[in-house]
Structure formats: structure tokens, C-alpha cells
Amino acid sequence: MTIARGRGRTTVPSSPEDAGTTEDEPAAGAAATPTRADPARIGEQIARIGRIGADPGGGVSRLAFTREEREAHELVGGWLRELALEVRVDAIGNTIATYGGAGDARPAIGVGSHLDSVYHGGKFDGIVGVVGAVELVRLLIEDETRLAHPLRVVIFAGEEGARFGEPCIGSKAAAGDLADRDLTRIRDADGVSLAEALRSLGMEPGAVPGAAWRPADWAAFLELHIEQARTLEAEGTPVGLVDIVSGSTRLRLVLSGRADHSGGTPMAIRKDALVAASEVVLAAEAIAHDARNRGARLTVGRLDVHPNSITTIPGLVSLTVDIRDVDSDRQRQLAVEVVRRARAFAERRKVGVTAEVIADTSPVVLPIWIRGLTSGVCAELGYAYKVMTSGAGHDAQVINGVTPAGIVFVPSRGGLSHVPEEWTSASDIARGVEVLRRSVLRLDTLLGSLETLPTAEGG
Ligand code: CO
């Protein structure tokens, strides 16, 4: 059997809904279809997972590759087993459960997200996509839906970069993007390597290459996730469909001036590294505000000042600049621009400057035909939707390297995320599950029709 997928994705016709651009595309006409998904059940499951790693302050600290993360995987794995799914855990700790399929070698449709959190994070980031996938399976079982393709619920391990600095570790292993050397290179703030963390959880780092997916085994992947921004809420739109996930270039700049007495040193002869750094902070903001760079986001999130004393002129300042853009060329050009301006400020103030790229990932354009399919589903349901970019990274963008992926957003209250106040209503999540369910059904049919087409070689 030859299957048109992956490299053959351009053979899939995009739907009429997709002929437009990335602007708002309100769904046509009729009143919204009620969801089959059960908001009460969804809410209870989110609350149940939220108790694992709960902070006294109301947030959740369920970090990557910890006992708490494993406990959450075991809890949800148990729910999936109760639904009679075959559940396994791969070598990096991703939990994978399979529902149905005709039993032959047809590629799977994947759905899922992650269960780890940042320090003092919320109960919804990642969780919504996992609970949504479980709810989807429940509905398929209730409806006695038979799929031609296996449906796989995937709970990725270690999505958040909060502990190890490296995000999407589980999905990178699945995409074959995690090299042996990464297992020892990637370390947390206490110096614990990823390999050591895996061993402490009873996993064998040497087996990690076995977690890589074979592209031929997969047909498509869908991730339901909270928006983590305020666009959907502000516009009253229940669903976001992601077209591009921003890339990110991260710079570390070190400005070296001269530490000196704050009272004794005349202003004219100072070499104040913090004043130069402040100019860089303002320049980064100005670059992002420049109308030519609309959409780019520049952030100086870290500033380390030495000696950090009230009565000493700052001699040395290290700062980071995070440059995010959906345009990969502009992303790198703006990084060059930041460094060029930093050099100019430094020269004028007679301080030294060094610049280093500490991370660099390209934007990911998600396949148009998947978005065409999900937007068609929204139109059918009568749900307004917005095609939008994602400033945050997600497992699905990594998985898109193995199999075509789509991301469906539901609104975040106040746009808040990575904080205890993070919240999405269960009814909004239920709508997202409905989009997921119908998209899986459409994918199952669409892929089935493609599999019966003759191939270029064969036909
Ligand atoms: Co997430």
C-alpha cells in the first residue's frame, strides 16, 4: 500500500476556506452546533491533574522529567487503559495510547500535548490538549466510531524549557531531533543532565533513539492548546487555527565598562556598562515598534549587573535579547541590527561589547491543507475562528518535521499563561474537543481516499 502523506502533502487539495490569507475568517451563518464533549467531565479531569505538583500558592510546579510529571502521565495513562486502549511509554517518557484502526499497516492520526509545567505555572497549558484527547476517545467509544486509521493519543514528556532550558524534549526525541550528546549537554540549574534525570526515573538514556517515530507510521498530528495570549478573548472568537509558529533567536550581550566610585568619578570620564545596556534595551523595543518590523517581538528578559552595588558604577552587564518573528529572514536581520546598535552604543560610551547567539530556531509554517480541514470543520460547526500565528512554541511544530501537524487554540482568560491565574472555561475546551473530533473524522476519510489513489510510480 502506498500512502500519500508527508512529502506528498502538496497533493492534498486545500479547501476553499483556505484560499484566503491569515486574516480573520468568520465562520458562515448558522447557529453554533452544541458540543458532544462534556464540560463537567473535562473540568474534573483538569482539576484532578492540577493536584499533582500543586503549590501552596495555587499554582502548579510539575517540572519536566520529575516524579510529578511521571505521576501525571500514569494517571492519564490509567484513564486511557480504562477506556481499553493499549498504552505504552517510550524511551524518553512519552505516553502513547492507540485506539482502533483497521489492524493493517495504515498510518496513525495523532492527537495530544504535554502534562509538565513551568515553575508556579497554571493548570491548563498542555493539560487541555491531553484531557481533550481523552475526551475525544470517550466520544468515539460512545458513538462506536470505527476509524480506518489508528488514533494515537500522545502525551509528550518535557515540553516546557523551564527546568532544562531546552523545550519540547519528548517531541524532539519523537522527531529524531535529540542526539546522544544532547542527553549529557542538556542540564538543569543543579547540573543534573537529562541522562541522569532519565535514569533517576528508571529510564535508560541509551534507549532514547528508539523513541524516534517512523514517518511512514504517521498520517497527521493535531494539538489542542490554550492560546496563551489575549486575541481570541478580546475578539470573542472561540477557536484559533495556527498557521505559523514564530521562530526565536536568542542573543547574549556582555558590555564591559569600568567599575568605579559613584561619588568620586566625574560623569564625563565614566564607562558605565549599565547605561550602555539600557540603550540596548530601549533600542530593542524601538526596533520592534518600527512599522517595517510589525509583528516582530523583542524582549530583554534578563539583565545581570556587576557588581550590583548602590555606590559603584556598573562595570559589567550581561543581558539577553529574545527576537521572535514569523519571518525567518527578518528574525535574523533584527538580531544583526540589535548587535550593530549595541556596538555603536558601546563605541560612543567607550565600553567593550561581545555578542553571542545562544539559541536559534526558525519559524515553522504548518501545512495549509490541515488548516483548510480544521477551518472547514469550524464552518460546519458554526464556530467563528481566527487563523493566527503562535508566539509560543509547541510540540506540534516539532512533530511537523515527521508528519503534517495542526494546532487548534482555545481562549485564555485575560491572555494569562505560565502563572497560577491561567484559566480557560470548560465549555471553551469542549468546543475545541468538538473541532478535534470532527477533524479526526475528516482526516480519516480524506486519508482513506488518498490511499486508494494510484501513485506516480504505480499508476
Ligand atoms: Co504548552
Image (spheres, rainbow, N blue to C red):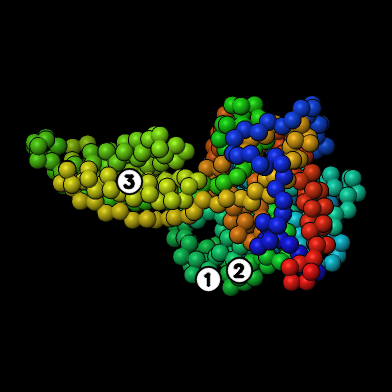
Q: CA distance from mark 3 to mark 1?
A: 34 Å
For image coordinates 49% across by 49% down, the residue present is 247
Residue 185 place in picture, x, y as percent? 46, 65
Q: Residues within 10 Å of mark 3 (few under 14, many from 20)?
A: many
Q: Earlier in the sequence, mark 2 or mark 3?
A: 2
Q: Nearer the viewer, residue 65 or 96?
A: 96
User: Which label sits in the foreground, 2 or 3?
Assistant: 3
Residue type (three-letter) at the residue carrying disc 1: Asp
The residue identified by callout 1 is 180
Residue 113 place in picture, x, y as percent? 66, 50
Residue type (three-letter) at the residue carrying disc 3: Val
- The quadrant of the rendering that contains the C terminus is bottom right
Label 3: state its secondary structure.
helix
CB contact under 8 Å: marks 3 and 1: no
Q: Earlier in the sequence, mark 1 or mark 2?
A: 1
- The quadrant of the rendering that contains the N terminus is bottom right
The residue identified by callout 2 is 208
User: Looking at the rendered structure, which numbered label has been put on residue 338?
Assistant: 3
Look at the numbered disc 2 and say if its residue's Cβ is closer than 8 Å to ligand 1.
no
Residue placed furthest toward the right: 144
**381 to the left or right of 254:** right
User: How many marks do you count on the picture?
Assistant: 3
Please determine whether, in this image, residue 312 is positioned above or below residue 4.
Answer: above
**391 to the left or right of 376:** left
CB contact under 8 Å: marks 1 and 2: yes
Residue 313 place in picture, x, y as percent? 18, 40
Q: Nearer the viewer, residue 192 or 416?
A: 416
User: Which label sits in the foreground, 3 or 1?
Assistant: 3
Label 1: state its secondary structure.
helix
- Determine which quarter of the picture holds residue 234: top right
For image coordinates 79% across by 36% down, the residue present is 380
- Determine which quarter of the picture holds residue 348: top left
